[in-house]
Amino acid sequence: MKLKYYFAILILGIVLLAGVALFATFRSHPTLFYVTECFVVLMLFYLWHFYRKTIRPYDTLIGGMELVRDLDLTTRLASSGQHETDVIVRTFNDLLSRLRSEHLRLEEQYTFLNLLIEASPMGVIQCDLDGNTTSMNPAAREMLSPSVKEAIHALPLGETTTVRIPGEPQLFRISHLSFPDRGYQHPFFLIESLTSEIRLAEKAAYERVIRMIAHEVNNSVAGIIGSLSGDEAERLTALSAFVTRFADVVKIPQPQLQLCDLSEEVDACRPFLENLCTQAHVQIEFRLTDEAIPVHLDTVLFQQVLINIVKNAVESIGATQGLITLEVTVPATLTITDNGRGIQSSVAKHLFTPFFSTKPQGQGLGLLLIRDILTSHHCTFSLLTDPEDKLTRFAIQFPIQKTQK
């Protein structure tokens, strides 16, 4: 029951008691009756004044507490004119002002944090206490391949691991962390792409080694090749050519990009590719689109990429009758498919690693050349064998160009 109802019951009791006393007094002492009646009226006025000074300010404070409960932090309580109550009102308004400022600051920080997470190149996945995903930013959605999902599910809290995507030159670092929230540790995952950093470190390392080896070998060969017999001279010449092929990898020029139609550029390479397949008795099929697909290409480097991919496909097919298909689809995708021996899952993890090769005499230069050229074109690509149809596909996704109106 509210306090004002208790106050009303008190007044009603006083009135009833005064009525009984006045009735008894009126019969014996009429003068005292009128004096007592005046006193009762004064007491009623006093009680009304006491109600206005005490109970009504109390209702005002209760209303203020309800505003706080409803998170209405903009309203302020008015002064009641009663000293004790006004002390509470001033304190309440001051606390409300501080609470509003703190609430506004937290909202601004929360908004800024959300914008930062959404725009971050690092993937962020938030989870609830049971480990179920509650939210993820756009970067995490792009990075969330089956291999990354598997690593996330197996990663203990507080641990960090690196994951290489099979068939792609992608390397990610995944961290399983937590943050305190209302007394509980809420888990989350950070996914960071290490591909560009690793690629630059690898390239800087093998460039230095290759330049040093090529310089020493070529200088030594040039100094002694004239004094050797035919067979020995040929072996040294082959050694020099072998080293030179490594040196050519680090001399890939920066692409001179120009706007081209993807189907037309693939079709322009048709004579080279058909000749390459004809010599190996392999069929080649072109599935090009009539729709213009604008892409920025260095045509010379792009031709080198196609020749190397088709050459690898021909070698994968071997002596058996095979088929290689080049298909251009929207949006700006080129897929080279072959029915060769395929790529084992254990091998797929090491593809596009410098100088990795499964061929007995392989140098691992073809995929390294392809990787560097496609990366310089800002393409995404993958090389995988489908476990269902057993076909191997090299898929290249080119950046989509906006058409000018």
Image: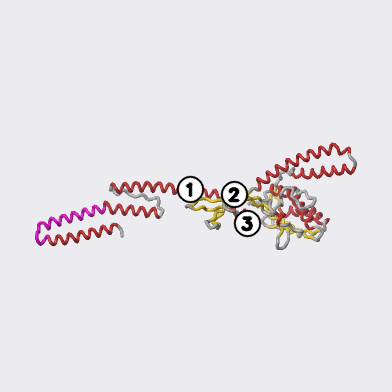
Residue interval drawn in magenta? 25-52
Q: Cβ–Cβ below 8 Å for labels 2 and 1?
A: no
- Identified by mark 3, the residue type is Glu
Of 335 and 8, the residue lying toward us: 8
Of 203 and 313, the residue lying toward us: 203
- Identified by mark 1, the residue type is Glu
- Identified by mark 2, the residue type is Met
Quadrant (top left, top right, bottom left, bottom right) of the N terminus:
bottom left
Determine crowd level at label 1: few under 14, some 14-19, many 20+ residues with C-alpha closer than 10 A: few
Judging by the rendered image, the residue that carries numbered circle 1 is 108
Of 386 and 73, the residue lying toward us: 386
- Name the residue rendered at 26%, 54% in the picture: 51
Q: Cβ–Cβ below 8 Å for labels 3 and 2?
A: no
Seen in the image, is 307 located left or right of residue 143?
Answer: right
Q: Which mark is residue 122?
A: 2
Query: x and y percent of residue 116 in the render?
Result: 54, 48
Q: CA distance from mark 2 to mark 1?
A: 22 Å
